Image (cartoon, rainbow, N blue to C red):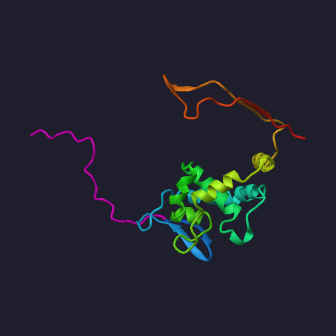
Amino acid sequence: MHQPFRAFAPATAAMTDNTIALFSFPAMEGKKITAAFDGGRITSDGGVMLLAMAERRLGVAERLARCIPDRRDPSRIVHTLTDMIRARVFAIACGCEDADDLDVLRFDPAFKLACGRLPDTGRDLCSQPTLSRLENAPRLKDVIRLTYALVDQWMASYATPPSSVALDISRRMRSIRPGRHLRRGAWASAALAVQRA
């Protein structure tokens, strides 16, 4: 009898070891934080924890918060400017660019941890109306300070800052397919040169 051709060896028994390597994060308020994949309270985006570690190391939210004077009544403040900026930056970085996304994300366990709050017992993050007030609060001078802070942050990422940087952004429409344009439409025309003093 002719044996059928077998391209592969017979399958081996499935692995029965369900051990998954855990991923640890820095402790929060004396509590250990570990990523596991065995269910429980689920987050919309676990990557926000890695983003939080990078943001804490760089201090971007605190740097930006220092540029905006807090004109709110101190007796009514629930969320600091740093907390609100951090929540907004994390939401945008995770693909939730609309401020109203925070109405759901404010309860998300990973977003709460990323913003320095415990998932079950920590205060919820700020809501969309609070973020809208934050986004409308800066005056022109504050916005200019924010811009400089971002440039300073970027320049600090170099061991030796470059002597100049040129950004050339085209104003022409770009098509990804015939008849379809990029979501943002026309690009602003700009050229920026940062000269080292």
Residue closest to the far bottom: 30
The answer to whether 33 appears left or right of 163 in the picture is left
Magenta span contains residue 10: yes
**Residue sitting nearer the eye, 85 or 110:** 85
Residue 6 place in picture, x, y as percent: 23, 42
The answer to whether 10 appears left or right of 61 in the picture is left
**Against 173, is 39 above or below?**
below
Residue closest to the far top: 178
The answer to whether 141 appears left or right of 95 in the picture is right
- Which corner quadrant of the image does residue 41 belong to? bottom left
Count of numbered circles on the image: 0
**Against 40, is 191 above or below?**
above
Magenta span contains residue 32: no
**Against 161, is 77 above or below?**
below
Q: Residue at x 30, y 59 (%)?
A: 14
- Position of the C terminus, as image quadrant, is top right
**Residue sitting nearer the eye, 63 or 14:** 63
- Position of the N terminus, as image quadrant, is top left
Q: Which residues are magenta?
A: 1-21
Residue 112 place in picture, x, y as percent: 57, 65
Residue 60 place in picture, x, y as percent: 71, 55
Give the prevailing secondary structure in the magenta stretch: loop
**Residue sitting nearer the eye, 110 or 85:** 85
**Against 26, is 197 above or below?**
above
Residue 11 place in picture, x, y as percent: 27, 52
**Residue sitting nearer the eye, 170 or 76:** 76
